[in-house]
Image: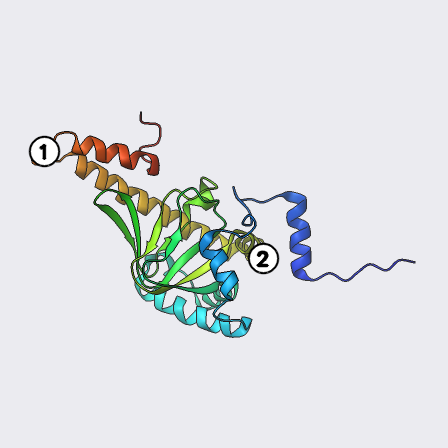
Amino acid sequence: EAKTAPTTPAMQRRERKARRGSIFTQDAPTEGGESFVAKRSQSGPGVQDDLLKGVVAEDYLRKVQLVSEHFHGFDDDDVQTLARTMDVVTFKEGEQILQRGEPASWVGIVLEGDLDVPVAPQLTFHLHRGDFLGELSVFESGTRSADIVAGTDGVIGLLTFEALEAFLAENPPLGFKMLRAMGAASVKKLLAEKARVLRAAELPMGTAPEGELLSYLKELAPRSLMLAGFD
């Protein structure tokens, strides 16, 4: 009589996922993954041991809680559980973190350092400790909508979509908190973007060369959810 091979929790998760499909618009990365993740996997992770990784991530997350409104409702158990799920990766000033048009495969939390998001000439958004990056791809398109470049050296807490999906399935209450935090972060970014666009639209045309505002809005439109659909 044939014996059934033992299965691990990870194997069971993969089997469940294969049966139901991914809840996200783009699942695991294509071969090689997104450039930032691919470079990390080629050079090897900074922290190999899972226990040590969790301790390092937990320390960063507790510092994030002091400055980020998104994680104020997370208790000690929440922080520990999330820390065990994240990969902790470093980046260097000037490094390309996200590239517009690439397939999205992960979402991150800035644990340390600053990131720059250039969206138009002379207009750059900035991400700091406690900010999410790449979270719009969880709810919207399966590709990155903007470039993100490291403004300083720093650290990101990274969750692949595969890890995030497993996290949501295994920790529903905490998963809901995470989705709510990411949704709030997305709304805040869009409102900030709207405010900047409206401020630019109210500038007297006489203060700039003719057509400069129009050129600015045309440059911003392909990258802006708020301006989507404008011709």
Distance between the alpha carbons at the discs numbered 2 and 1: 54 Å
| Number of marks in picture | 2
Residue 53 relative to residue 133: left or right: right
- SS at circle 2: helix
* Secondary structure type for disc 1: loop
User: Which residue lies at the image location 68% right of the left edge and 45% below the top edge?
Assistant: 19
Residue depth check, mark 2 versus mark 1: number of the one nearer the observer: 1
Quadrant location of the N terminus in the rendered image = bottom right
Crowd around label 1: few <14 · some 14–19 · many ≥20 (10 Å): few
| The quarter of the displayed image where residue 36 is located | bottom left
Q: Residue at x 37, y 54 (%)?
A: 96
Place of residue 217 in the rendered image (x, y in percent of width and height, measured from the top left): 24, 34
| Vertical side of 51 occupied by 211: above or below | above
Residue occupied by mark 1: 204
The answer to whether the residue labelled 2 contacts the one labelled 1, judged by CB atoms less than 8 Å apart, is: no
Q: Which residue is mark 2?
A: 170
Query: Could you say which is closer to the camera, residue 228 or residue 116?
Result: 116
Q: Residue at x 30, y 62 (%)?
A: 152
